[in-house]
Structure formats: structure tokens, C-alpha cells
Amino acid sequence: MTKKIAVLPGDGIGPEIVAEALKVLECLRTDFGLAVETEHAHIGGAAYDVHGTPFPAETLELCRASDSILLGAVGGPKWEGLDYSVRPERGLLGLRSELALFANLRPAILYPQLAAASTLRPEVVSNLDLMIVRELTGGIYFGQPRGRRINTQGEREGFNTLVYSESEIRRIAHTAFQIAQKRNKRLCSVDKANVLECTELWREVVVEVSAQYPEVELSHMYVDNAAMQLVRNPKQFDVMLTDNMFGDILSDCAAMLTGSIGMLPSASLNQDGKGMYEPIHGSAPDIAGKGIANPIATILSLAMLLRYSFDDAASAERVEKAVIKALDQNLRTADIHAEGAHKVGTAAMGDAIVAALRATTH
Ligand code: IPM
Ligand code: MG
């Protein structure tokens, strides 16, 4: 049966990097018989410009009707002055929330070819392969009450609420344990239980859930220490489980260990495995339209889509191998460029990956 992907390029470099992932998808269709169709919709600032909202009803409808979603990036200075309720980011957050995409998987893998691109010493990051499991539909990102007000002293005041119910913690904990079970069976849960009641509950519930996964070794770490350990000795981690905001921060940090945030894909899954796939980086307005962005994170997001939503590990591996082949050919976009390598733009990198993919038929 033909599967459907909703394609949401978004803002900034979003359309450029998504275009390269679509070339890869087209190759899988024509050369490998993948039965897939795509339909585009607007999200973020691009949607605001056309529909007056960053999250139009037709975009949500398309996403609901599709088997999975491929997203580029949202946001940019053009929309920064807008009211919070119509900022581009609301589109992304709305989609995560409406589709209950609570489980965000952010793998950080260092490709040996890029060891020199990391700001850390090669021996600290070589063979790095860790997975951050971030809760994505709760916590301070969505907690009520929230807003701005004038306090009794007549001062402006901003406030947000960090809140998690035990069922929210439990379901993301199960996801993390199940992933750890398939990997090296070590799970580190990150919290701030020494200060925040909410994350004290987080720790308590994670410990309860751990009883069902006796073969997984569970540890706990305060988030400040976790940030430090990530740059001190990242290879001590296998799977990290975090709440929404800590996961946002730690995953950017983990990304940089691998040389460039332009390399890291992500999957956001709901209870039924329906997913949205996007690079973890943002819309990079400073380089938008220049044709120099790295499309690899988006292409690897497509690989995750094939693996998790289409249950097609063979196609996913093909794409991942094609990416490695392009790196082996010493091709590098500006963000991962090092002396002696061949610098290429967005489209040339995409083309090289497609060529490598095509070559695997023979
Ligand atoms: C991410 C991004 C988003 C987030 C923004 C764009 C809303 O930083 O996916 O990590 O904070 O979750
Ligand atoms: Mg982020």
C-alpha cells in the first residue's frame, strides 16, 4: 500500500534541506520501488505569511491524514516581533501537541570521518553513539498557567509552569527503557530533583518503571552535571532520558560533540508509532537561501522515518550508507569542512548522496 508523507519545509534553510531529502526519497521510489507519495503544506513563518497563522487547520488535517511527517525548520528574525501566539515556533509546538508526539528521539552519532570536525579531542568523541530521549509534549513548554502580567509592585513579570503528571513520565520512561534494552542497556535519567519537586516526581516514577526492565542499568544525574559530563566524557552515556526543556538544551550540546548540529536527525513519535521527523537544528536564517546548509540531518531524518514509521530498516540503512559514502568521498558542507576536504553546497551534497544510493543497486 502506498504510504503518504506530509512534507512541511517551513522557514529559513528548511526548504533547501527538505528538497535534498526529497531527491533521496524520489530515488528510493524510482530505483527501489518504495511505494510512497508526498503532499506539501505550510508551517511556521511561511504559513503565517500565507494564512495568518503558523499552524493552519489544513496543515494539521494533512498531517493527521498522512502516515508520517517530514519537517524542515521553523522561525526567523522576520517573525520575531509577532505575538507569541502566532510565532513560527507555535506551529511546531502545536503539531507536537495535537498529534501527541511525546517521544522525541535524538541520536548523536559521531561519524569517524568527522572526528576532526568536533571541537572536542578525537579520543573523547571517537565512536560516540548516544541516544537522547526527550519528553516532547509536556513540562514547562506547555504547563499552565503561563504568561506575562504586572505584579503588585507594578513591575512586569513573566511566568511559566513546570508540571508533569505521573502518566506522562511513565510513558516516556517506558520508551526510554525499551530503547535502552535494544542498545547497551544503560539508561541515565536527567533531572533537577535536588531543587524541583516536579523532577523529584520524575525520578520517583522512573525508578518505579525500572522494575519492569531489570536488565537495564538505571542511573540518575542532575542536569547541570549531565551537561558537564556530556562535554567531559560523553561516551559514558548510552541512553539519556530527559524532560522537555532539559532535552532541548542537552541535545544541542550532544549535537556539537558530533562535529556539527547539521548532522543530527530526530524522530517524534506518538503512542502508535506515528511520527514527525526533523533535523534537530533550526532554520539558520543567517545562511538561508545561500545554498550552503548541510542537508544530512534532514536526509538522516528521512532514514529514521523509513525505520520507525514505515518499518523499512532496509531502506533506512541504504540511505545511511549513502550518507557515509558521500562523507567517504571527502565531500563536506561548510559546517563540517576541514582542511583537505572538498567543500560542497547543499544541492551538491544531496546529489552525491543520491548518486551513492543509486550505486547500491549494482
Ligand atoms: C528543538 C527546537 C524547538 C524546541 C523550537 C524551535 C521550538 O529548539 O526542536 O529543539 O525548543 O523544542
Ligand atoms: Mg532545540
Image (cartoon, rainbow, N blue to C red):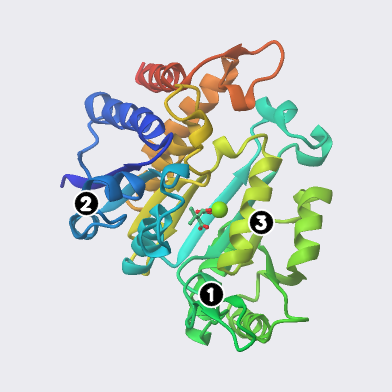
Taking the image as shown, residue 313 lies to the left or right of residue 124, namely left
Q: Residues within 10 Å of mark 3 (few under 14, many from 20)?
A: many
The numbered mark at residue 250 is 3
Quick check: 20 above or below 65?
above
Which is more foreground, mark 1 or mark 2?
Answer: 2
Which residue appears at 64% of the width and 59% of the height?
A: 239
Task: Determine whether the residue tagged by mark 2 lies in a helix, strand or loop.
Answer: helix
Report if the beta carbon of the residue with label 3 is closer than 8 angstroms to ligand 2. no
Identify which residue, 310 or 44, lies in the foreground: 44
Where residue 200 sits in the image (x, y, percent)? 68, 84
Write down the residue under mark 2.
Answer: 51
Badge 1 marks a residue whose secondary structure is helix
Q: Earlier in the sequence, mark 1 or mark 3?
A: 1
> Which residue position holds label 1?
139
Residue 346 at x, y = what percent?
45, 22
Q: Is residue 139 above or below residue 240?
A: below
